Image (cartoon, grey):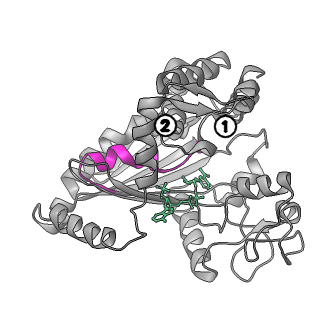
Amino acid sequence: MANKVMSVDAIHDLAKTTLMKFGADAENAGAVADTITMAERDGCVSHGLFRLPGYVATLKSGKVNGEARPTVKTLAPAVVQVNGHNCFAPHALKAGRASLIEAAKTCGIAVMPMIGVHHFAALWPDLEEVCDAGLAAFACVNYKPSVIPAGGKKALYGTNPIAFGWPRPGKSPMIFDMATSVMARGEVGVAARDGHPIPEGVGVDADGNPTTDPNEILKGALLAFGGYKGSSISMMVELLSGAMIGESFSYEAAVRDIADGGPPQGGQFIFAINPTLVRGDDGWSEHAEGFFDKIYEQDGTRLPGDRRYQNRAKHLETGVEVSPIILEKIAGL
Ligand code: NDP
């Protein structure tokens, strides 16, 4: 069957009404639908409608409260804590974002620890509005154990994505957003389904031995990118989104998770920096643009995010092609 072309508004509608059908109220459903729609709009298919059945599973199991009202507490002038009270992360983020921006603008830097949330998405949607306010920003989140610490044999870290955004007044911000595992687990699953081997250095089997068999990696674990260096970055994500904010490490999230197919409960760590206050003047933008020009001068380069922004421009004009398999799955929920 051919893909169905859907407008961005139709995707939002489908996501929101589906979530509301399973107990989310308009505010909670709307926030998650925003994130799903942004992913589809920018061509990040694995975090768009594809995730809707997982979100629904978590509403159905009762693990997530679809009527939660996140609370925002200023712990210090530059620390804005959001407690999601078991909501999906996009709703908590929406509740705290304006306070984070305000605090960073005033203090130069501000941190937003998010606790009691369920994260199941890409990180760049969490930063774009913060960067559009003229701030640089960083976000990270842990998950459930799927990556071994360098030298070890057993999964302990999540795939632990990190994202960093840089504001570009008058343009969309530069945001890179990447898992700290060599490959996403979903891609290993696709290779297993299609019967393709996985390149060496991606994962290990259940006994911790290197393998290129995707089925064995799914029973075992992934490796962090860049060997011990990526492993340390993944460890940093655990510390920032776990001990630093009073939330679970990946292994703790797994213990209390009920494996319903949706995201576990955990925390997310975000900070924002006001370059004008840190530098003492407004010259940062022109200075950085000159640097980006130097990157573009070299054939074959691009900035992280450029692929998404190209997709965005195209999809807003032509609509998004959505797989009929996903639409059938959603209809059958
Ligand atoms: P990719 O490896 O596809 O991309 C990582 C980053 O590199 C992107 O910002 C991408 O920009 C950029 N990039 C890719 N190619 C180039 C290039 N040639 N030059 C410059 N920049 C480039 O992402 P991952 O597979 O690592 O992660 C995919 C998503 O999964 C992320 O959004 C991540 O947040 C999410 N994730 C979420 C988890 C969770 O628990 N919530 C867990 C793990 C991952 P562009 O987008 O423009 O291609």
Which dot marks residue 101?
none
Q: Position of residue 200 (x, y in %)?
A: 76, 76
Q: Is residue 247 left or right of residue 275?
A: right
> Separation of disc 1 and disc 2 at Cα?
13 Å
Q: Quadrant of ligand 1?
A: bottom right
What's the amino acid at mark 2? Arg
Task: Using a 10 Å C-alpha cutoff, classify the residue at mark 2 as few (fewer than 14 neighbours), some (14 to 19) or many (20 or more).
Answer: many
Q: Is residue 50 above or below residue 309?
A: above
Residue interval drawn in magenta: 118-136
Residue 134 among those drawn in magenta: yes
Q: In this orientation, which residue lies closer to the viewer: 58 or 224?
A: 224
| Residue under the point 41% across and 31% down | 317
| Residue under the point 68% across and 20% down | 22
Which element is circle 2 on? helix
Q: Answer yes or no: is residue 225 visible.
A: yes
| Residue under the point 43% across and 38% down | 314
Quickly name the residue at label 2: 41
